[in-house]
Every structure is written in C-alpha cells, then in structure tokens.
Image (cartoon, rainbow, N blue to C red):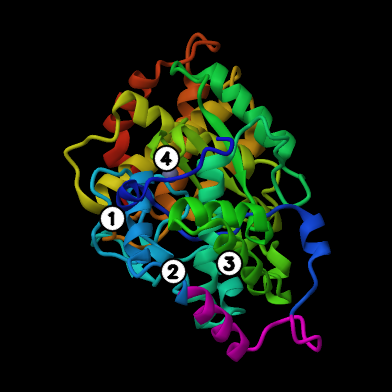
Amino acid sequence: MKNSLTLPAAALGLVLATSLASAPAQAQAHAAATAPAESGTTANLTEEQTRHLVERLKSGLPGDYRARIAALDAAVGLPPAGLGETNAGVAGAEPSRLVPAGGRSASPELRLADGDNEVCQTTPLLEWQSAAYAEWTEYDLAEVVPWIDFFRMYDAVLFGTEADHQYYGTDGQFTTRVRQTARDLKRFWDIPSGEIQVVPMHATVALDQAKVARLMELLMLYPADQAAQFAADFVPLVNQEKFDYGMHPALSFDAFAYYGGEVPGVGVIPPKILIGDGILEAYATLGLGDVAPRAIVAHEYAHQIQYVRGLFASELTGAELARRAEMMADAYAGYFLAHVRGGALDRRQTKQVSQTFFQLGDCYLTSPGHHGTPNQRMRAADWGAQVAKDGFPRGRILPTVAFAQRFDAHLPELVSADPA
Ligand SMILES: [Zn+2]
C-alpha cells in the first residue's frame, strides 16, 4: 500500500465503505505521549468543548461525506452503521461482522423468538458493551465514536498487513493465540489461504496523526495540509479519560471479514480478517480470554470459506438468511477447534467455544443483521464440535463444501426452540 494513495475524485463516490465502531490504536506509546485534555483541569472535554471541536472538524468535510462513507461501507461489505447513515442497504454484501449491527446504545430487548418457546435475552458480554456505552454521552456515540471506528477500520482494511509486527490486544496479550490459530486454520481447511491476511484493529489509530491524515487524504480528498490539521485537531477528542485515552475496549468491540477487491487509489486489497482489540479484552473479563480469540478468528475465517465456496446463497431471506450464515460460521469454528488436527481443544475448552458464540447471540430477530440467538449460536458451535468428535477416521477433515451441506441439513434442528 505504500504511498501511492492519491484517489481520483471520480473514483470516490463508489469506493468507500465503512462501519464506524471501534478505534484503531497505535499502542500505548502514543497515548502516553499525548497530553490529556485541553482544559488542564479535567481529563475529559466538556460537552461544549466536544461540540465545538466536532463542528469545526465537520465544517471542512465535503457536503456529501456521509454518502461517500456509506458507499465505502457498502463496497467493503459492512452493515451501514455510524457515520455513513443510510437506509440504502448493503446490496450483495453478506453479513460478516461478529457483532450484529443492532445499534450502539440500545441493548437487545427481551423478546420471544419467532413464536416458539425460546426466550431471547441479552448476555453478559452484550451487557458489558451496553454499560460501557452508557458511560459516554449521546453526542459522543453519534459524533465522536463513529469517527474513531472509521479510522481504525479503514486503516486496517486498506493498510493492515500481517507483515507489520502486528499485535492483538492493547498489550499484545492475545498475539500468540491469534497468530497460531490463523496458521492452523490456513493449513486445516481446503480453500486457498495464501492471500488471507489476519490483522488487528486498534482504536489508538485515531491518535496516530500520520494514519488519520492518510485516510483523510485518500477518502475525503483533503489536501495534505488540511488532512494534517484534521488529524491534529482530532487527537483531543480521542485522548480523553472516558475513552481510556483511545484504549477503551468498547472502542474496538468487533471483528469482521473483508473479502478483498480493488479499491481505487489504493490497489487490490487481499481478503482480510480484522480483529478488534476490545472484543478480545471484553471476553477476557468473562474468563474467556484463552478460547474466545481462537473462536473469533475461526468464525471469521469461516466467512472467507463461505465467500470462496459461494455458500452465502440460500433460499432463505432477511434475518433467516443472515442467521444461517452466522450459525454456519459458528459451526465451522466449533468443528475446527474440536478437531484433533485443528485446535485440538479439550472438552472444557470446547464448551468455552460455544460459550463464546452464546455471548454474542442477539435478539434482533427480524433484522437483516441478526446473527442467531444466544442458544442458537451455542447449539451451532456445539454441533460442529460434535461432528469433529464423531468423525471417522479421526484424522479426516471434511471438505468445506461437505461440511456446509451437513450443516444445512441440520439447521432446522439447530434453530428450533429449546425443550420446554
Ligand atoms: Zn460472522
């Protein structure tokens, strides 16, 4: 990706997709080097200071910036969220994000699922997320956090590479597990894996003035000096105590798969798996810091399988279509992690895999971003693990397409309600 980043203006309208949910981080050094808030008396800006800064930054944006970002998000295949507000939908894009696009401030309602007897409710992990968001103002959630998301996601999508001495978790505490899982997955499944890049998303990227400026030049067509000024002005918005100076885990609480493609002005981007620091750290608070990173990488890798093998297509539509893809990815992850030639997890760890997906289950039962209820996701991962355990001979690995066919045959049973 080097320096050849000049994006022709004509190209802009079509290319930029983004989903602004977490922040890129440039590691602790940056946070430490940046002075806390301007006032000198508090580590947080006042609401008035925040609004003033945001308005100033927005005044220089092109009038159609939301449309540009929505177009970018669509091109990258992310659900429209945050900055690029739009109801245009994501035609052709497949659900790929680990956290459903259900809204940043609302916690899922308690609802009955599809008229059956399965009661859906929020989970400790999603309650953790809601509690984190509750510490921020509505204005922060609407106008500041989406920009942090924008920078962390687009920096990773466009420029992240495995070759960059990457680390996972703000202290690198998950690096070994993520990398090892990525290596094992590439050897395990029968798809071409050489191009797939697993890269982190750090919210602290929003404090990295060179990286923010690069994105503003490329995606908003800012001249270099204006981009540099934007990046400098943006720092105090991120560098607040309430955001843990850019390292708050709720600023990077997601993971997603990007299938690659040509981005005008940048070139051809390879398929990528993008992992936010925050989602790994949130799981660690639930005691899942060992297994969840592996489960998340395996789930996102499964989306790459689905893409390569054309497995997103189905007779299902809407929420059921999305749920099928997500539960299938959970099942692929369960199979890989329980398999003797895959993750080779023991029984206790395998239960933690299904617990990982249970925690992410949502109750947006009619949303096209629906990923499955907690119980449904748990059952999908358990089912995949059981297929691995029952496999014969033990060392045999099912072809990816054969696994998907088995999954589809069992899907009705996996989504059905728990016994009363
Ligand atoms: Zn997914």
Q: Residue furthest left?
A: 315
Q: Is residue 230 left or right of residue 6?
A: right
Query: Measuring 54% from the left and 18% from the top, which residue is drawn there?
Result: 188
Q: Is disc 2 placed on a helix, strand or loop?
A: loop
Residue in front for this viewpoint, 137 or 301: 137
User: Of label 2 and label 3, which has the lower sequence position?
Assistant: 2
Q: CA distance from mark 3 to mark 1?
A: 35 Å
Q: Residue furthest top?
A: 393
Mark 2 touches mark 3? (CB < 8 Å):
no
User: Of label 4 and label 1, which has the lower sequence position?
Assistant: 1
Q: Residue type at mark 2? A: Leu
Q: Which residues are magenta?
A: 38-58
Question: Tag 1: Cα neighbours inside 10 Å, few (<14), some, or many (≥20)?
Answer: many
Q: Against 388, is 5 above or below? A: below
Mark 2 lies on residue? 61
Label of residue 368 in the image: 1
Residue 60 at x, y = what percent?
A: 47, 72
Mark 4 lies on residue? 380
User: Of label 3 and label 1, which has the lower sequence position?
Assistant: 3
Mark 3 lies on residue? 230
Q: Is disc 4 placed on a helix, strand or loop?
A: helix
Q: Against 97, is 180 above or below? A: above
Residue in front for this viewpoint, 53 or 108: 53
User: Of label 4 and label 2, which has the lower sequence position?
Assistant: 2
Ligand 1 falls in which quarter? top left
Q: Is residue 364 left or right of residue 231?
A: left
